[in-house]
Amino acid sequence: MKKNIIASTKFPVSGPYSAAVEANDFIFISGQLPVDPATGEMINDIEKATRQVLTNIKMILNKTDLDMSNIVKTTVFLKNITDFPAVNEIYARFFPEEPPARSTIEASVLPKGALIEIEAIAIRK
């Protein structure tokens, strides 16, 4: 099995894990929080937070010469499920065609008090 750790100082990682791991043709992206990689600041507005999380995922994919269309599955963790409509609106802008499979769940507490966390699986086409 071919395994490649995808890392960069631009990706907000704060623990003993990789931002992403490529195994064969799959890219497993760890849960991304709404952290601005330029400032290290946590974003606490759900719309801006959603946009930042998806932008962080996009940056990770760009490191592997892939884009959002390569994502086949996401899992969205929300601190408050009532934020789902706002999240869904932003999310749809990142996946205008052939969106990936998705699960969305409410989690009572997310790391660092985040409002949202998204993990993703992508594949090389």
Image (cartoon, grey):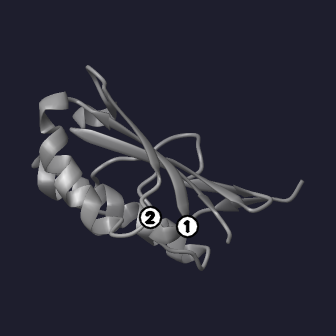
Looking at the picture, how far across and down is residue 116, in whole percent?
27, 41
Query: Tag on residue 70?
Result: 1
- Quadrant location of residue 37? bottom left
Residue mark closest to the camera, 1 vs 2: 2
- CA–CA distance in space, label 1 to label 2: 10 Å
Looking at the image, which residue is at 59% across and 50% down? 18
Q: Is residue 16 left or right of residue 76?
A: right
Q: Which mark is residue 102?
A: none
Residue 18 visible, this angle:
yes
Q: Earlier in the sequence, mark 1 or mark 2?
A: 1
Q: Is residue 114 left or right of residue 76?
A: left
Q: Residue 41, located in which quarter of the rendered image?
A: bottom left
Observer-nearest of 9 and 93: 93
Label drawn at residue 98: 2
Residue in the image at 46% along x and 68% along y: 68
Secondary element at image label 1: helix
Amino acid marked by disc 1:
Asn
- Which is more toward the observer, 106 or 12? 106
